[in-house]
Image (cartoon, grey):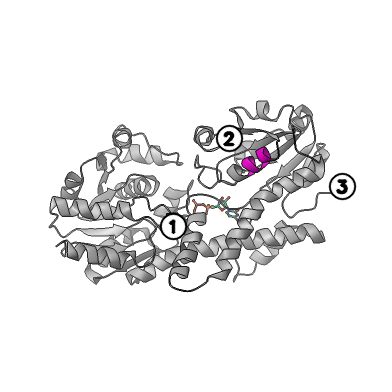
């Protein structure tokens, strides 16, 4: 049965959630405090780059609207998703001020309806209990609260929402959880019902485990380089064990994005705040930091001192399919190369605009050929299809030098060597 849904925060998670629920037949009202965003959504323009989102917004334009007015959104909805930012503070804890502002606003409006608030933002374990207490303190006892963490991956968020591996719902009152579960039932995925703190923990534990898998395979890759093994085949051999599985075992220049780095640190912090030292996560973070910098060592092995050397970075976004530059490995890598007095140029098919605001001192190109021409070395940082598909023998010809560091193991080493490159992958031995 179609429901009236509200979404507070029309950022990445809020907008995808809203558009997907609208596509399932529900009437969705998004509320954001950013006027430009609200206007763009009203015009059918997604303010973020996400595959298929514009099309989806177009298809369900009659059921998806945006407003600046919380009271208006509340009036139009029964189930209200909260998808506001929870950035890390200086202490590594999550900043919940935006969540608390929403509660203040609800109090000011005098919200008395039987709304159910559904927390989609990633929040520290214990937040739900705090919000519940705050709601009660403000006389908003009739408003329900559930935790429903999101597991969307940027770039494939719509498919992840509509075909999830699982849906997790934590509630204080079963009736509230039932309403949220009913929304997801048509998707046919397993729905796990838990307490609110357990649902909050499932989100952190899942992201921390995936990040651990990546740091683990990156360390295996580094050892492979020492002993002459090939990490891609090692990962394949490991992944065939059903207990391990093949996913998230791609070695590279480290994980980035708005989630893994933030959530791993937040979980470590959360444990620390309650007196537990989460040793494993400390290593996961440290391995990831070192991994971003290892490319510099590889370049030096071929080029010696990097001063004045022309280094071309292909791909800047933290992964393909997004213009998101948050915690992208390219940012640390570019800064390290600049600190070595190298001259750094960069190309990205989508993230250039976002990169200009994030990375200083780099020369940006909107054409890959202009970027690689005359370079001493090329580093493949983000495995965009348009970068993998370049005419690599031609790249080798237009460069000044011959060094190619494949930071995502996206190319065939034998082909690269045949094209004339001095090839370096991550955890692979190039044929001589
Ligand atoms: C991640 C999780 O995968 C989602 O399930 C979760 O919902 C989301 O965080 C979140 O908490 O909101 P996302 O940050 O979009 O999603 O990106 P991923 O596709 O998971 O990639 C994260 C980083 O790990 C990227 O930099 C990617 O290049 C890197 N990665 C991924 C590897 O280096 N190796 C791999 O094998 C996989």
Which residue is rendered at x = 35% and y = 68% of the image? 126
| Dominant SS type (magenta) | helix
Q: Is residue 414 left or right of residue 157?
A: right
Q: Is mark 1 within 8 Å of ligand 1?
A: yes
**Disc 1 target residue:** 151
Q: Which residue is mark 2?
A: 348
Coordinates of residue 314 in the picture (x, y in percent): 64, 37
Q: Earlier in the sequence, mark 1 or mark 3?
A: 1
Q: Which residues are magenta?
A: 333-339
x, y percentage for residue 269? 47, 64
Q: Residues within 10 Å of mark 1 (few under 14, many from 20)?
A: many
Query: In the rendered structure, does residue 264 fall within the stretch colored magenta?
Result: no
Asked whether residue 82 appears in the rendered view, the answer is no
Label pair 2/1, CB-CB below 8 angstroms: no
Question: Compared to 405, does 233 lie above or below?
Answer: below
On the image, the x and y values in percent for residue 221 come to: 71, 58
Q: Residues within 10 Å of mark 2 (few under 14, many from 20)?
A: many
């Amino acid at each position: 049965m179609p429901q009236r849904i509200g979404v507070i925060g029309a950022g990445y998670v809020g907008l995808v959630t809203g558009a997907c629920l609208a596509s399932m037949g529900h009437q969705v009202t998004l509320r954001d405090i950013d006027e430009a965003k609200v206007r763009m959504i009203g015009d059918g323009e997604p303010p973020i780059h996400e595959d298929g989102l514009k099309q989806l917004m177009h298809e369900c334009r009659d059921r998806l609207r945006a407003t600046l007015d919380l009271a208006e959104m509340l009036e139009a909805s029964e189930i209200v998703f909260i998808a506001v930012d929870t950035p890390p503070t200086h202490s590594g804890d999550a900043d919940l001020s935006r969540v608390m502002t929403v509660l203040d606003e609800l109090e000011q409006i005098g919200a008395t309806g039987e709304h159910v608030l559904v927390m989609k933002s990633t929040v520290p374990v214990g937040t739900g209990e705090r919000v519940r207490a705050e709601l009660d303190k403000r006389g908003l006892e009739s408003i329900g609260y559930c935790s429903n963490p999101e597991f969307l991956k940027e770039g494939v968020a719509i498919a992840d929402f509509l075909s999830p591996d699982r849906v997790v719902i934590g509630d204080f009152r079963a009736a509230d959880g039932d309403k949220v579960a009913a929304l997801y039932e048509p998707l046919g995925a397993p729905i796990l019902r838990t307490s609110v703190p357990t649902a909050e923990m499932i989100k952190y534990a899942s992201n921390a485990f995936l990040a651990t898998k990546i740091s683990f395979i990156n360390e295996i890759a580094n050892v492979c380089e020492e002993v002459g093994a090939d990490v891609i085949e090692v990962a394949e051999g490991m992944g065939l064990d059903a207990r391990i599985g093949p996913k998230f075992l791609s070695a590279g220049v480290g994980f980035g994005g708005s989630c893994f780095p933030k959530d791993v640190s937040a979980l470590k912090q959360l444990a620390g705040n309650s007196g537990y030292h989460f040793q494993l996560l400390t290593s996961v973070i440290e391995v990831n930091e070192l991994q971003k910098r290892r490319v510099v060592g590889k370049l030096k092995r071929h080029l010696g001192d990097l001063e004045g050397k022309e280094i071309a970075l292909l791909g800047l976004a933290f992964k393909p399919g997004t213009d998101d530059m948050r915690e992208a490995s390219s940012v640390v890598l570019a800064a390290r190369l600049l600190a070595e007095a190298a001259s750094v140029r960069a190309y990205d098919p989508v993230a250039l605009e976002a990169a200009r605001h994030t990375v200083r001192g780099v020369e940006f190109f909107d054409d890959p050929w202009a970027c690689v021409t005359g370079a001493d070395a090329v580093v493949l940082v983000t495995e965009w299809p348009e970068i993998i598909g370049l005419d690599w023998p031609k790249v080798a010809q237009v460069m000044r030098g011959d060094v190619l560091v494949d930071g995502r193991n996206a190319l065939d080493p034998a082909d690269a060597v045949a094209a004339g490159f001095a090839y370096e992958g991550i955890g692979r031995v190039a044929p001589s």
